[in-house]
Image (spheres, coloured by chain):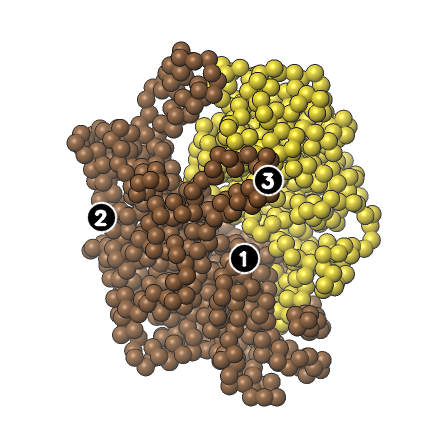
């Protein structure tokens, strides 16, 4: 009933008298024309104009704006309280403490998620025990057996769902927000998709050991851990890659056919042989996506040579033993190779060392520093970072690939606080949702509704199909469908329609009874602590005027204002 | 008379184009061997997971088929016979009459030459139409849209490309801004009304300046001292675009809450559709096609064809899904009526499944598969493609259907002969489709 009245109210608030001016040209736009499609060494650049700001665009940042700027990029949303706190203790001190990993409390909300502390083996044993033979053919089962079977099958999604829940909770509630925002960057940089095969069982330890484990560590460690993690080895197929041999399939088939006329047996033999091919997937992506950037410094010959060197890097997947990286010499083709203009000698005694030399080389490669610095600056500073700044950040990265040092170089760079960078980034859908939850101090009982919103905004967690990760530039996310979904989420969060999420009573404390204009000021300060534009203010006034005329349930008005503020142009920026 | 028809019936097309009045693609259409299809539409349906050819287009006279699929083969009496060799799965019954009318064809043993059995790679390679090539990041339909866009900016009254789902399929992703339409479009007008004031980009005069600036290269706009606000512009676009779509789909009828699932379409003929989301999407597509707003490409995916388990014979998962798809498609084609002449439905999958069944009532990832074509000027009532039988020696790696028709041949014909697109050299990286085409259209 309550929902009904809210919705009826919504329908009443129809803004009148404003038709949309036809948007010739930018409707279905390729607005800026071909010449604006400058390409960098790292791909096509965002075609984004400068965002207009609710301030003199050239004025240097005030002290409070500097704090807000840092908190806009290195937290998932600067609440008024946090701005005050950081201003009080000092920006440097706050940033340093976060880089040192302080305030990284294990959230009590995560305690109920039992998979988070498990090993891969424990997760598989508990959640993927397999369907017993007597339950395998669904059509011949009793209702009781059916129920049991679907229970077993459903359990396979528990680790994935717990992981996704944990990531959202940590992003919203975690008090080390530098860790959370940088982990978000790396999660997307080394992107894996839990929809692919067994990745869903291994993603939990991936998040824990590779992403969270190293985001305040070194890139060297993160790359090396990722290269040996079952999730990555499965996601990018290296676990089945082995040296190719001539006529292997034919030989296997002929051999099997000589022994039996049984079709299935022959097929099985071929199946086994089929798995023995070389797979270039990981070898390519580790250079293209993880280190050097597409077509930088490496060639197709390097990809093949590295794929050969990486043969035998596989996963022990028998659930009766620890599920972990395993080097299988039998799958490995040992040879001396030329990779990235570097001689990699054969190592007969330790074949694993061959590809390891390449990984070491990639960590130290100038191209890797350039690429990582570019992506970090694009993420934390501007969709089009200045090459000079990228160069300085790359220099800081190169020394030891120490990540806190690199983040600090961004924070300390003279360009970081330039007015052109302030509020210049359009929030990605996940950044928008998490910041809305933070600014409304939302209580989260379950993240189901949040995950559904992430899906409808096209950025479901750990489910980017492409190994490239989600786009980090604004233009990709400004799709009309996505904008409308943002508004629906905004209003839904304000009104309390998002499943499992509630704005707590304490959030509304301070609203003076029967004084809607004070509510507007009060709530605007909470959601948009740095102020809002005159246009937004006028539009808000209009909504309030409507409210006065139709006089709906007054207790809903505050919720409604919050919904509108979250959907305002100001809130889409960071 | 519509402009395009005018161009077709006069020989002035080239002169008009050279005078800069229309884009080059319209002239190219005149070279199409089967003549111009006015305002062609392509509906791309992608079956994700690897749809099984053998139980859909059943080689009912082949004894090996029954031998290698002892549990899941379609029993001969249940097969809808098309000819002495081919038959349809009984769940395909709603499409039989279109086959008989010559409006439904399939290309068997089609697919990608790339040997991968990964869904992930195979879909990528097919949707980018670039097997083995990882540097292409624009989908093949997006490349088409981009190549044929109006160089002076698209007509704001036109809606060229939409995906009737939350995310664009990869074939539509890329430089051209195709639009993914939120599924709850019907209930969206409240938020559009509500946020209009917040996103109107200032007064009309200022908005005009903003638009002018947005059309200029970023550098030029900056030099002219105009700052473009893309957040505002995007909000305004959203409101205009979705209002228009909503209007097209639902007229002025406002949803009544509590009965929002009930149908309240008004006007026009009312086509009965089966239940389910796929039918709803097609119903929406039919509305937009009929509205004649320049729609060219519609995309929608159907997930869940990866039937390792329980693919089944006449009673399994495949049966259920084929019924779901074929009843929806049949209603869609009926609804389109005369518009079906300019609407082609292309149904693709990343690969077919292994010929023999596995131990779980299903079949594993294979190679060659079936591509379906319905509507447009398809020369239907035929099964295209080279059939090589089911003897192990004739199979890919002795277990899967060989690919005897590269999917790019089909896509090329769709673009050239249905869409009237003068396929530029290199449209498919490292691949040149046959000059003559496959002869599927006529």
Question: Could you tell me which residue is drawn at 51 percent across and 19 percent down?
Answer: B395
Question: Could you tell me which residue is drawn at 40 percent across and 47 percent down?
Answer: A126
In the displayed structure image, the side of residue B12 where residue A292 appears, left or right: left
In the displayed structure image, the side of residue A228 where residue B412 appears, left or right: right
Q: Colour of chain A?
A: brown
**In the foreground, A54 or A220:** A220
Q: Can you give x and y, in whole percent of width and height, for residue B386 in the image?
A: 59, 19
Q: Can you give x and y, in whole percent of width and height, for residue B37 in the image?
A: 71, 35
Report how far apart the C-alphas of labels 1 and 2 lie in the structure. 41 Å
- In which chain is the residue bearing label 2? A
Q: Which residue matches tag 2?
A: A364
A4 versus B381 height, above or below:
below
Number of numbered discs: 3
Bin the neighbour count of mark 1 within 10 Å (Cα to Cα): few under 14, some 14-19, many 20 and up: some
Describe the element under mark 3 as helix, strand or loop.
loop
Whether tag 1 and tag 2 are in contact, CB under 8 A, the answer is no
Q: Which residue matches tag 3?
A: A142
Q: Which residue matches tag 1?
A: A452
In the displayed structure image, the side of residue B64 where residue A228 appears, left or right: left
Bin the neighbour count of mark 3 within 10 Å (Cα to Cα): few under 14, some 14-19, many 20 and up: few
Describe the element under mark 2 as helix, strand or loop.
helix
Q: Can you give x and y, in whole percent of width and height, for residue A248 in the image?
A: 36, 20
Question: Could you tell me which residue is drawn at 75 percent across and 56 percent down?
Answer: B262
Describe the element under mark 1 as helix, strand or loop.
helix
């Amino acid at each position: 009933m309550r929902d009904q009245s809210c919705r009826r109210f919504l329908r009443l608030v129809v803004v009148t008298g404003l038709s949309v001016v036809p948007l010739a040209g930018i409707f279905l736009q390729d607005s800026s024309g071909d010449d604006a499609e400058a390409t960098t060494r790292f791909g096509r650049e965002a075609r984004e104009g400068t965002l207009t700001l609710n301030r003199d665009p050239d004025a240097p940042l005030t002290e409070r704006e500097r704090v807000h700027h840092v908190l806009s990029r290195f937290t998932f949303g600067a609440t008024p309280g946090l701005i005050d706190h950081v201003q009080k203790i000092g920006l440097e001190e706050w940033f340093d403490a976060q880089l040192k990993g302080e305030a990284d409390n294990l959230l009590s909300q995560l305690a109920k998620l039992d998979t988070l502390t498990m090993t891969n083996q424990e997760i598989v044993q508990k959640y993927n025990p397999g369907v017993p033979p007597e339950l395998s053919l669904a059509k011949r089962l009793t209702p009781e057996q059916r129920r049991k079977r679907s229970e077993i099958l459903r359990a396979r999604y528990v680790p994935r769902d717990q992981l996704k829940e944990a990531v959202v909770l940590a992003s919203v509630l975690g008090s080390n927000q530098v860790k959370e925002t940088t982990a978000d960057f790396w999660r997307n940089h080394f992107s894996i998709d839990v929809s692919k095969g067994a990745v869903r069982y291994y993603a939990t330890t991936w998040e824990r050991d590779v992403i969270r484990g190293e985001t305040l560590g070194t890139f060297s460690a993160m790359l090396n851990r990722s290269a040996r993690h079952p999730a990555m080895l499965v996601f990018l197929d290296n676990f089945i890659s082995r040296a190719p041999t001539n006529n292997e399939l034919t030989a296997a088939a002929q051999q099997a056919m000589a022994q039996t006329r049984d079709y299935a047996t022959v097929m099985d033999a071929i199946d086994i042989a089929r798995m023995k091919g070389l797979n270039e997937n990981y070898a390519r992506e580790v250079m293209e996506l993880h280190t050097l950037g597409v077509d930088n410094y490496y060639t197709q010959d390097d990809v093949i040579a590295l794929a050969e060197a990486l043969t035998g890097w596989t996963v022990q997947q028998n659930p009766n033993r620890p599920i972990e990286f395993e080097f299988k010499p039998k799958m490995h083709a040992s040879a001396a190779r030329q990779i990235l203009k570097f001689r990699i000698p054969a190592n007969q005694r330790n074949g694993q060392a061959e590809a390891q030399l390449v990984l070491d080389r990639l960590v130290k490669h100038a191209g890797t520093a350039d690429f990582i610095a570019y992506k970090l600056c694009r993420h934390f500073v501007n969709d089009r970072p200045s090459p000079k700044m990228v160069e300085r950040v790359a220099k800081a990265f190169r020394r030891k690939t120490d990540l806190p040092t690199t983040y600090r170089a961004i924070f300390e760079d003279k360009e970081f606080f330039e007015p052109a960078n302030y509020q210049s980034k359009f929030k990605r859908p996940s950044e928008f949702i998490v910041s809305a939850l933070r600014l409304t101090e939302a209580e989260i009982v379950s993240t189901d509704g949040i995950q559904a919103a992430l899906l409808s905004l096209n950025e479901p967690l750990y489910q980017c199909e492409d190994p490239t990760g989600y786009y980090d530039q604004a233009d990709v996310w400004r799709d009309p469908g996505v904008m409308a979904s943002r508004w629906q989420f905004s209003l839904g969060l304000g009104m309390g329609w998002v499943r499992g999420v509630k704005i707590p009573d304490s959030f509304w404390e301070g609203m003076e009874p029967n004084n809607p204009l004070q509510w507007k000021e009060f709530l605007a300060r909470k959601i948009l602590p740095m102020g809002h534009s005159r246009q937004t203010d006028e539009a808000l006034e209009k909504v309030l005027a409507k409210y006065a005329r139709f006089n709906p349930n007054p207790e809903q008005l505050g919720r409604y204002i919050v919904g509108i503020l979250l959907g305002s142009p100001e809130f889409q920026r960071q | 008379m519509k402009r395009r028809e005018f161009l077709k019936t006069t020989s002035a097309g080239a002169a008009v184009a050279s005078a800069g009045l229309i884009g080059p693609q319209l002239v190219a259409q005149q070279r199409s061997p089967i003549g111009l299809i006015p305002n062609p539409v392509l509906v791309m349906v992608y079956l994700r997971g690897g749809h099984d050819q053998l139980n859909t287009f059943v080689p009912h006279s082949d004894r090996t088929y029954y031998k290698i699929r002892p549990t899941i083969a379609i029993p001969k009496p249940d097969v809808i016979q098309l000819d002495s060799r081919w038959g349809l799965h009984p769940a395909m019954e709603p499409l039989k009459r279109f086959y008989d009318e010559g409006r439904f064809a399939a290309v068997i043993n089609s697919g990608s030459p790339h040997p991968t059995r990964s869904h992930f790679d195979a879909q990528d390679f097919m949707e980018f139409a670039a097997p083995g090539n990882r540097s292409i990041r624009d989908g093949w339909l997006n490349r088409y849209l981009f190549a044929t866009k109006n160089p002076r900016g698209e007509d704001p009254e036109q809606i060229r490309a939409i995906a009737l789902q939350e995310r664009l399929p990869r074939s539509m992703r890329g430089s051209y801004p195709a639009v993914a339409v939120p599924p709850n479009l019907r209930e969206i007008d409240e938020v559009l009304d509500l946020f209009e004031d917040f996103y109107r980009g200032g007064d009309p005069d200022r908005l005009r300046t903003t638009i002018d600036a947005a059309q200029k290269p970023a550098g030029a706009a900056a030099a002219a001292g105009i700052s473009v606000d893309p957040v505002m512009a995007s909000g305004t676009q959203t409101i205009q675009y979705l209002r228009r779509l909503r209007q097209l789909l639902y007229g002025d009828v406002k949803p009544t809450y509590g009965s929002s699932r009930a149908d309240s379409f008004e006007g026009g003929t009312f086509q009965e559709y089966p239940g389910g989301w796929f039918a709803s999407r097609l119903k929406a597509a039919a509305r937009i096609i009929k509205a004649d707003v320049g729609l060219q490409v519609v995309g929608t995916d159907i997930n869940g064809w990866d039937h390792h388990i329980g693919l089944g014979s006449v009673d399994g998962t495949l049966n259920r899904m084929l019924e779901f798809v074929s009843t929806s498609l049949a209603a869609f084609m009926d609804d389109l009526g005369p518009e079906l002449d300019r609407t082609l439905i292309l149904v693709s999958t990343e690969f077919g499944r292994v010929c023999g069944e596995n131990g779980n009532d299903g079949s594993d990832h294979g190679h060659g598969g079936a591509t379906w074509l319905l509507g447009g000027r398809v020369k239907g009532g035929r099964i295209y493609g080279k059939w090589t039988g089911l003897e192990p020696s004739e199979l890919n790696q002795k277990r899967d259907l060989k690919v005897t028709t590269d999917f790019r041949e089909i896509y090329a014909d769709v673009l050239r002969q249905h869409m009237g697109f003068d396929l530029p050299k290199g449209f498919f990286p490292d691949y040149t489709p046959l000059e003559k085409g496959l002869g599927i259209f006529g």
